Amino acid sequence: MMKPTLTFSLLYLLVWSSILFLTPKDVFYSGEGIIRWIIFGAIFFILPYLLYKSIEKTKLTKKAKKGIAYMSVFLGIPFGLFLSSQSERELEDYGKETYGIIDKAWLLVRKSRSDVWSVRAKYNVGNKTFYTSTKENPEKTLFEGDTITIIYSEKTPQMSVIMELKKE
């Protein structure tokens, strides 16, 4: 029978490996869907719990164990940076241009920071409609119905950039 700490350690590695290597890229860039929320929950709730349980039997103080588990949430930062660099590279290598329409524009009200004008665009690739994720437009230059230029990846059409918002 496997020790519980070893089981939790293996589960921790399995969950991270699944997120990194088994999750289809289009899930991260689709802008919607339950799987994105499951991944978010895994990174910010399930993984810290599994890490805590895997170090539970060590001689560290309870406070140190909790600190390590809470700090593991920050592993989401390099993961986000990895996704960002991967998408930049893919858009450079497989980027295609198309036109889209701002289908939603609104003032995003935020509690701890100032509110910001936000937009979402829709665009077609082949016979399929895609939506960008929510993009901030602090200058408030884009409105519903505006036609915009989108660069999308030929390999992963959900991966896209609104050129009018791209900062040089």
Image (cartoon, helix red, strand yellow):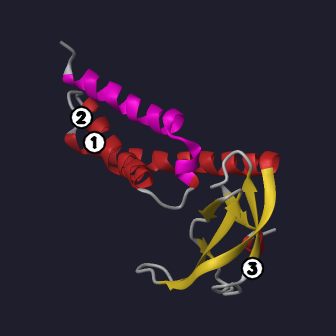
Q: Earlier in the sequence, mark 3 or mark 1?
A: 1
Which segment did they paint magenta?
A: 4-28
Residue 1 position in % (x across, y down): 18, 12
Label 1, residues with CA under 10 Å away: few <14, some 14-19, many ≥20: some
Q: Residue furthest top?
A: 1
Q: Residue at x 26, y 24 (%)?
A: 7
Q: Is residue 167 visible?
A: yes
**Mark 3 or mark 1: which is in front?**
3
Q: Can you identify the residue that label 3 sits on?
A: 147
What amino acid type is highlighted by mark number 1?
A: Tyr
Q: Is residue 107 above or below residue 58?
A: below
Q: Secondary structure at mark 1?
A: helix
Residue 95 position in % (x across, y down): 79, 53
The dot on residue 49 is 1
The dot on residue 53 is 2
Label 3, residues with CA under 10 Å away: few <14, some 14-19, many ≥20: some
